[in-house]
Image (cartoon, grey):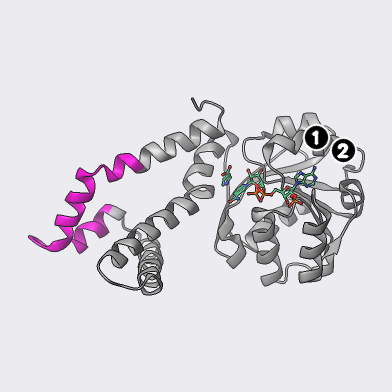
Amino acid sequence: MKIGFIGVGAMAQAIIQGLLRAKFVPAENILVHSAHKENYENYAAQYGLTAKATNQALAADSDLVVLAVVPAVAGDVLGEVRDQLTTEKTLISIVSGVSLSRLEELTDYNLAILRSLPNINSEFGQGMTAVAANENLTGDKKKTALALFAATGEVSELPEDQFAIFSAISGSAVAYVDFFIDALSRAGVKYGFSKETATKVAAQTTLGSAQSLLASGQTPAELIDKVCSPGGDTIAGILAMEQAGFLNSVVKGIDATIDKSTGNAK
Ligand SMILES: NC(=O)C1=CN([C@@H]2O[C@H](COP(=O)(O)OP(=O)(O)OC[C@H]3O[C@@H](n4cnc5c(N)ncnc54)[C@H](OP(=O)(O)O)[C@@H]3O)[C@@H](O)[C@H]2O)C=CC1
Ligand SMILES: O=C(O)[C@@H]1CCC=N1
């Protein structure tokens, strides 16, 4: 099986690294092409992938074609490869905000298509990907397309009308969680920790909290209550964070993310 990536930017590279780590296919069965020859050729050479000279050549030689370009160029690129996307292939889009019906309009109505929204943690097998299949993607073809993402982390089939919300609290939220880790780490630096130590402590604490939350089956609020000793330090910190607008600032960030991805941003 050959998997072709149109675009080898940040997200495509994370998926490719996740696939290589999982040994999902041999490296040479991963085909790449992008806008700049030096980018895709160097990347292919570095990891033993196969560079293709054009989007058409890539699509013609791939069983699974992963569309990994920014939304603004997705239509033009699909127009370019429309003739190569024959019905035995599967198109996988990772493009935020482009619906299955739009992808069908831009290709062949008989084509099997999986719309996905991965996150960048796919690189280390810790991804969280939402998927929605069109009615042509069934049976073994669907199993294979879902297996690609399962090799890089968790996968969840979601109705398309929930994709923008998912994208905000997963795809984009990787950056928001890192923003929080950076804030914790800077606070440590303020009180004299080295940046390296503070970041390690903040990241391990975030990882441990996430793992404990999932393992416990409890709500975050229940775990917060366990840490807040009566009359103790943590409740003082929680109240000060909330006074500064912590919860509202997170929700406003998610509102802005959803507005931007659905075209409602002011
Ligand atoms: N970054 C993330 O965390 C996530 C991103 N996504 C989605 O992934 C997609 C890519 O995002 P991201 O990786 O961040 O963006 P990047 O800007 O990092 O990558 C875009 C890629 O598209 C390539 N490209 C541009 N024009 C063409 C073309 N005409 N033909 C072939 N390749 C082309 C670029 O080539 P070159 O490198 O040569 O310039 C580049 O490799 C977006 O649609 C985004 O919504 C979804 C979930 C998470
Ligand atoms: O910022 C973006 O537009 C993409 C979509 C989700 C994560 N990155």
In the structure shown, which secondary structural element does the residue marked by tag 1 occupy?
A: helix
Marks 2 and 1: in contact by CB < 8 Å? Answer: yes
Q: In this rendering, would 141 be left or right of 238? A: right
Would residue 213 be seen by someone viewing this image from the given angle? Answer: yes
Q: Magenta span covers which residues? A: 221-249
Q: In this rendering, would 74 be left or right of 119? A: right
Front residue (pair 165, 31): 31
Seen at 30% across and 55% down, the residue is: 220
Seen at 43% across and 39% down, the residue is: 254
Q: In this rendering, would 118 be left or right of 105? A: left
Q: Residues within 10 Å of mark 1 (few under 14, many from 20)?
A: few
Q: Which residue is mark 1?
A: 76
Q: Residues within 10 Å of mark 2 (few under 14, many from 20)?
A: some
Quadrant of the rendered image containing residue 248: top left
Q: Is residue 237 magenta?
A: yes
Would residue 26 be seen by someone viewing this image from the given angle? Answer: no
The image position of residue 247, as x and y in percent, is 30, 43
- Furthest toward the left, the residue is 231
Q: Is residue 214 magenta?
A: no
The image position of residue 56, as x and y in percent, is 90, 46
Mark 2 residue's CB less than 8 Å from ligand 1 = yes
Q: Quadrant of the N terminus?
A: bottom right
Mark 1 residue's CB less than 8 Å from ligand 1 = yes
Task: Tell how many labels.
Answer: 2
Residue 80 is marked as 2
Predominant SS of the magenta segment? helix
